[in-house]
Structures are given as structure tokens and as C-alpha cells.
Amino acid sequence: MTNPTLGTWEARAQALKIEGRAFIGGDYTHAIERETFDCLSPIDGRLLTQVASCSAADADRAVEVARATFDSGVWSRMAPANRKQVMIRFAELLEANANELALLETLDMGKPISDSLAVDVPQAAQALGWSGEAIDKIYDEVAATPHDQLGLVTREPVGVVAAIVPWNFPLMMACWKLGPALSTGNSVILKPSEKSPLTAIRIAQLAIEAGIPAGVFNVLPGYGHTVGKALALHMDVDTLVFTGSTKIAKQLLIYSGESNMKRVWLEAGGKSPNIVFADAADLQAAAESAAGAIAFNQGEVCTAGSRLLVERSIKDKFLPLVLEALKGWKPGNPLDPATNVGALVDTQQMNTVLSYIESGHNDGAKLLVGGKRTLQETGGTYVEPTIFDGVSNAMKIAQEEIFGPVLSVITFDSVEEAINIANDTPYGLAAAVWTADISKAHLTARALRAGSVWVNQYDGGDMTAPFGGFKQSGNGRDKSLHAFDKYTEMKATWIKL
């Protein structure tokens, strides 16, 4: 069926068989202590399945398996061209199972099924396939040596990689890590968020079908304070990669120092400025982009354009365009292909977002639209896309990452003021600039302390562009060839001839 309806997706959801066990050594398995937790759908609050709640004992077991598999060389010493073929097959299997994976993603974390199908699954598959395709095209180096010496510079896989990924793009964020980590020959233990573990569990079996040897890719669902902490403190984990909050990112750095100084690569929070100058060529496009930048994925995006900086001279003209554009973003049943705003991931996150909205009121910001829970009769966790005007950059809603559809509008009068406001945050993940002046665009982009800057668009880029942050938004980069740096050690071998 080319165009599934709401009824079709609901029927598929009813028939779906959901796996909730951990995956270690090539097989699904219960947690050693047989603990589980309820996996609830934010769409309507119903129980999807019981998921294994792994502990330190499971982490020990998975690390032991991953280490033994790595040391065996069955994957780590496989020819890069052969690993490439397996990774491409892994990507193809994600595409072949797109409907199931998209449905799991939507049921688990509440995003619209149309986004799961058009964004999450294809980009996850692309991350695997692109990384695999690249691996036999990355060359080592020969140093500039005297005639009787040979200096080799080579890259080797780090060993055992623990990847802790977030709940907002569960499959895609996992594959941003899995692509380069597996392609370079490492063994990986994936710890999905307890809020959205289902696609991570499912793709473990697809990895085996693709030809990844048992023990190379393992999945440990569970809580951060139990199995996540155990992996971060484990003395035999070589590298820890993480996407999530800045608070947890800082704690993981501490755990590294308390254990074996494992390499820690972090992609953390953001409070991204979307700067619209008076000379922007297309204010309508900028307004539509501003609405999408905060409403897409319910605002649960680390790069969400949550601060809209508008030059004062155009504010009265521009803001009504944003309000009109936001009317097209309405919460609805995520299983309806027409829905473009789904449910927030769970009740805890919904209450967090509502508390920030209350903070905006208390601090004197002016609510223009939204600001309330909606569709409460469904039993789901839905919040209206929200815009506050009259926001000072010192306000809580302008300084802290809300991770919900809440937009703060801030006015500026000059390029210098816009840059100062944009950079006045602990974060530095992304920013956007709207202007028809090419020099202003370049100079502003250079002045912005952010890992990604988009000009006359929001959220541009693909697998060829590195993604990561400045300041407390993290270190290292996902995507592009630069991602391989996180999963390899560089070795200098100097030979006397």
C-alpha cells in the first residue's frame, strides 16, 4: 500500500510483535537480574511491552563479550572492503524494514509517523551505508623521513565502544555512532534511552542478518544511573560516546576520570539562535523556517531554533508571519500521516516543558500563542507549540534548554548586539543567519560560537558535514569523515632501514 492511512498504521500497531530483551553475543537475553520496566506509548499512555532493565552485571557480561570478540579479530581485523559490504547490507536491511522501524519509533517516543518514515529511518540507513562506503577509502600516512628511515602513521580501532544515545531521534542518533564505530572495526555496546529503546533492540537482529559477527554489536536497555553508569565507569571500555543533556555529559567526564580515562566524546545541549536581519531576502521563508525550527519533532531537538532573534525594524512585520506559519503545526495522533506535531516523549518531559512555560509567565514574557497541554482526552502527552515575545536573554526560558515547542522572541538593533545575544549562552551547538548581504552572512557566521551555522535556512547539512558543538554543547563531531577520529587511535611506527 503506497499511502497508508491512520487506520492502516493502527492495525499494524496492533499486530506488531515488540522485542524488549537485551542483545548480547548475538542473542536476545533477559537482564541477569530479570528486572524490567514498562515501555509506555506517549500517544495514549498504553503499555507497549516490558523492557529488560539491565544492571552493572549485564554491563560486565556485554563488555566481556565485546572485548573477546574484538580481540579475536573476526571483525576488527577484517579487511575494510569486506566490512564495507556488511555495513552497506546493514543499511539496506534498515530500509527494507522501514515500516516496522518507523512504527516502533512513533509508538515509542511519539513522533509523527510521516517523520519517522521520511527522516529517521532513511537518515539512519544513510549513516550506516555512508560510513561503510567510506572505510576503504581512508588512507594512512607516511611521514617525511630521512632516506634511511620509514615513518608510518596508522589508525587502529580503539576497541570496545560504549554508545549512550538519546530518546528524541533514537534510531538516527544510534546510527550516527554505529556507522563509524563499526566501520572502523570496533565492538560496540549500545545503551538506548529507557524512554525509547525499541528500535535499538530491533536493529541488533538486523546487524546479525547483515553479517556483523555475534558479539560485535550488543544492546543494553536500562537506566542511566544503573547500566549507563556501569558502562561509563567500566575499566575495559575504551571509548564512550554520548548524545544527551549537558548535565549528564559533565557527569560522564567525571566517570572517565574516576575509572580508566576512557576517551569521552559528547554531543550535549543547545539553545540555538535563529537570527533574522532586516535585509533578509525572503521574510516569508524565514518565518516558515522559524516555525518549523521549534515545532518539528515537538521541539525535542538539540538544535531547535528556540531563540528567535529579530531586528527591531522588521519585528512588527515579521512576527505575524511566524504566528501564521505556526498555525500549520498542530498536535495530533502521531499515527495519522497528516500529523506534523506528535506527543512529547513522556509525562515527565511534558511536565518539564509546562514548567518552563510557567517560568516564562512568571518572568514577564508575553505569551503570544499556545502554552497549554492539549488532547488530554487521548491519555497522551501533547503540548501546543508556544511563542513568547518580550523575552530577555537573561530569562530562564532563553538560557536553559527546554526540549519542547517553546520559542523565545528576542529583539536586537545591530549586528554586534545580535552576535552578543546569540553567544550569551553556555551552549554552542547551532545557529542560523538570515540576510541578503553575503559579507554580513560570512562575518556573522564567523563570529557565532557554534558548531553548525546555517545561512538563509535552518538545519542544513547531510552526512558530509561534521556535526557537534562548541562550549558546553560538547566535543568531537558526528557525521563526515571527522567522525572516524573518535573511534580510532593514531599510531606512529618509526623504522630504521
Image (spheres, rainbow, N blue to C red):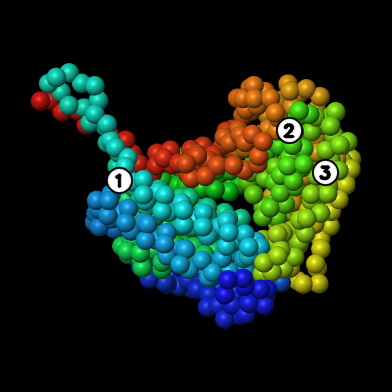
Q: Amino acid at mark 3?
A: Leu
Q: Position of residue 454 (x, y in %)?
A: 62, 36
Tell me the residue that label 3 is attached to. 321
Tell me the residue that label 2 is attached to. 281
User: Which of the two residues, 217 or 2, is positioned nearer the viewer here?
Assistant: 2
Viewer-nearest of labels 3 and 2?
Answer: 2
Name the residue: 17% across, 26% down: 150
Relative to 229, does residue 289 appear above or below in the rendering? above
Residue 328, quarter of the rendered image: bottom right
Relative to 472, does residue 387 appear above or below in the rendering? below
Taking the image as shown, residue 116 lies to the left or right of residue 75, namely: right
Q: Amino acid at mark 1?
A: Asp
Looking at the rendered structure, the secondary structure element under dot 2 is loop
Name the residue: 45% across, 67% down: 96
Q: Position of residue 62 (x, y in %)?
A: 38, 61
- Say which label, 3 or 2, has the lower sequence index: 2
If the image is split into quadrants, where does the C terminus sit? Answer: top left
Residue 382, quarter of the rendered image: bottom right
Tell me the residue that label 1 is attached to. 136
Callout 1: few (<14), some (14-19), or many (20+) C-alpha neighbours within 10 Å?
Answer: some
Does the CB distance between marks 1 and 3 fall below 8 Å?
Answer: no
Question: Label 2, label 1: how many angstroms apart (C-alpha)?
Answer: 43 Å
Q: Position of residue 473 (x, y in %)?
A: 59, 38
Q: Amino acid at mark 2?
A: Ala
Viewer-nearest of labels 1 and 3?
Answer: 3
Looking at the rendered structure, the secondary structure element under dot 3 is helix
